[in-house]
Image (spheres, rainbow, N blue to C red):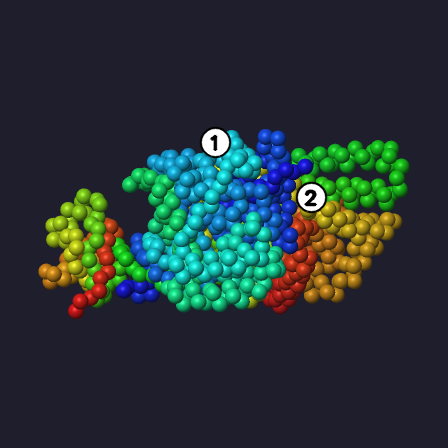
Amino acid sequence: MLDARHIPLRTGQTYRVHALGGDQRIADRLLQMGILPGVEFTIMRIGPMGNPLELAIAGGQSIALRNTDVLALDCELLSLPLSAAPPGMQHYQVLVLPAHPRSRRKLETLGLHLKNLIRIEATRPYQLRLLEENRSIRLGQTEAESLILQPIENHD
Amino acid sequence: MTDFTVAICAAPNTGKTTLFNRLTGANQTVGNWPGVTVAKKSGHFQLDTHQVLLEDLPGAYSLTATTLEERISRDYLLNSPPDAIINIVDGGNLYRGLGLTLQLAMSGLPMVVVVNMMDEVRAKGIDIDFDAFSEHLGIPVLPMVARTSEGLTNLKHTLLSVLEQETVEHPPHISFPPVLEEAISDLARKVEHQLPADSDQTFIAIRLMEGGESATRVVDRFPSLTPLLGEAVASRQHVEQHLPFDLPTTCAQCRFNAVRGLVQEAVRTPPQLPKDLTARLDRFLMHRYLGLPLFLFIMLILFQGVFSIGTPLQEILAGFFETIDNGLRDTAFIQALPQLAQSFLLDGLLAGLGVVLSFVPIIMLFFLFLSIIEDSGYMARAAFLMDRLMHLLRLDGKAFISLLLGYGCNVPAVMGTRILSSRHNRLLAMLLVPFTLCSARLQVFLFLSAILFSATIAPWVVFSLYLLSFFTIILIGLLLRPFRFGAAEPFIMELPPYRLPLARTVVLRAWQEIRGFLYRAATLIVLGVMVIWFLTHTPTTVQPGSMDTLAGGIGLFLAPLFEPLGIQWAETVALFFGFIAKEILIGALAVIYGSANLAATINAQLSPLQGLSFMVFTLIYSPCVATVAAIRSESRSWRITLLSMGIGLVLAWLASFVVYQVGSLLGY
């Protein structure tokens, strides 16, 4: 399981809360707002100078929480746009393709499809390793922002 | 004569205040909950033949009290249960709001649930089935748009039938895991033996098992339950061994599971919501780089608005007082009075009233703009943008707005600290506000620097005073960092959707602030002005403010203290006047020097360095009497008030000392 402590918090990442650990007062307050273990949230926005974070909670509410308090929650990374993922050995599966037709066509010509397994070799410019075909492709920033990935356990 | 008491209980941002205003109109009083600085509002309205007292409980997310507001609500419901509760939930966010609804419903008190902001709900294409909702909840649930009074008649009608017990309510049963269910019903049976039948045993049993302060309060109210305390603790431990989470988490989970079921039964959401206005506005207003400049621009408009409208109003009021003053001076009645009484009435009492009233336009305008910013939902965004910076001073983003308001006028800025989320934040912000360079101080600095410095240097002098003000705030903030005023509260801030503020609510708020200011601060201001009058006008035989008056005597006595600052006795006496209002420092100097050409005299009396030292002292030393009165009335603590003045005086002396001594060493 990839949790919030392993990769930097970035806009667009979606997490599931497993436990409201850390600060008891934060946990109590979240409980009362109906934010319970099992809930999912997406980081919508990061404040100037990296703090606080705006979280869109599944169900409709938006709350602001400080960086450290988010990190204190025990949560699992569910999905993230390519632009919010660090390069490394972590494997990902393509979860959602960009909605925009032009980006979609571009990925098609590159041979990137839904459910493809990839590894991120470099970011800005983005270079992905297609694990099943054992070749690398390069993507632009626009595609990277709308290509949603799901981290998966490495099998090797 | 009150027939029924009804309490409004709801989470923040649900339109609680709007509904309260709709029901009571102007028939309301604002006080305080006993022993705390949280405002308590109550009002009356007529329901059929009954007179109903409506109590507005502070915003609370739950009855498991974490915040002061929640504790107040819980204790109120426990200790003096009302005849009925009106619970409001935001229709756009039913899930969160219903958590509290279920807790309230379990208390067994009669209640009505109001689903507010139905216009927004409909605009989103969401459909709520109120019949199914009421049936599943076992309590009447009504649609409402409090902003437009839609559904108000229906609410009154339903409330009446609940109060007259024509509507039979059956509060919902929340299913807990079996082990917990057994423990609760076990305990509830034992509670039943001890208490009258009409109390809700399950509710009390859960409070007992929660332990801590929640249980203590129950036992305070029902001492016969004390023997059950130990049993409740053991029972909780037993239960928690068999559950994956602790008791509060489990209870909340069960509650919100029930809520999820309710929402599923009664609410039909269209699969795709339109990309709404809030998201579009936030793209700009919350932008990483554009957000802050836009925020500063909005604040600039606020300042321009307040002062371009407020200053002419203040001038009209000042002219009005001058006319009264002149008119009175010539009346036979005043002429017949001895010199001392004449001066007391006109220069003391009337002048004091003039100072009080001169703040009214500014306070009114500030709060008009402030409530627009708050009600529209922008306040939370501004706080979001500024949070990182203010966190350095152990404040949250909202405090920045208070400080910024201080650069206009300290009085509404101190009053505005009420929007902050904890007592710690309120008090800390209150202590920092007096170091902002308000418009009254600015007048003094513009005047003096223009006389003492060349045209090229003068703007830089004023600019550096602004810098000194920022620097002082940060310094004091850091110095006070280790201190905690009241319990800390976590920073979790809701970012509500943008809404159009209602003119009625905005105006009512401004009116309440002015009334509050006149009631609570006016006496202290008039008193302060009269003390200064007394010091500068006794004995009566000498020129007011001269060396032979009491103030002059104090000035001479303090001369050794002020000498290292380059401040002479005449300016020391002027500082006394400055306590009434900073802008009258200049006029006071003219009186004390007794000179026709003030600019020339100041030039002759003060070196530029002495002038600078004097301005630094004026910036930092204790704020004007109106600000002190505001601090006293907001903090309800003389210690904080005196601390504020003390920090100011000590720091002003130190800063002026450094400026004057370093300047002298450098040969200025």
Position of B329 relative to B412 (above/below)? above
The residue nearer to you, when weighing B35 against B558, is B35
Pointer 1 chain: B
- The local crowd at label 2, few if under 14, some if 14 to 19, many if 20 or more residues have their Cα within 10 Å, is few
Position of B649 relative to B350 (above/below)? below
Pointer 2 chain: B
> How far across and down, in percent of the image, does residue B58 sit?
55, 48
> How far across and down, in percent of the image, does residue B584 sit?
69, 47
Amino acid of disc 1: Glu
Query: Mark 1 — residue?
Result: B150
Residue B555, by quadrant, is bottom right
Amino acid of disc 2: Tyr
- The local crowd at label 1, few if under 14, some if 14 to 19, many if 20 or more residues have their Cα within 10 Å, is some
Judge whether residue A90 can be spotted in this image.
yes
Q: Residue at x 45, y 54 (%)?
A: A32
Label 1: element kind: loop
The residue nearer to you, when weighing B259 against A10, is B259
> How far across and down, in percent of the image, does residue A126 sit?
21, 58
Residue B263, by quadrant, is top left
Q: Residue at x 85, y 43 (%)?
A: B341
Mark 1 or mark 2, which has the lower sequence index? 1
Query: Mark 2 — residue?
Result: B519
Q: CA distance from mark 1 to mark 2?
A: 35 Å
Would residue B375 appear left or right of B4 to someone viewing this image? Answer: left
Would residue B417 appear left or right of B542 to someone viewing this image? Answer: left
Q: Residue at x 33, y 39 (%)?
A: B268
The residue nearer to you, when weighing B583 against A36, is A36
The residue nearer to you, when weighing B97 against A142, is B97
Would residue B378 appear left or right of A120 to someone viewing this image? Answer: right
Label 2: element kind: helix
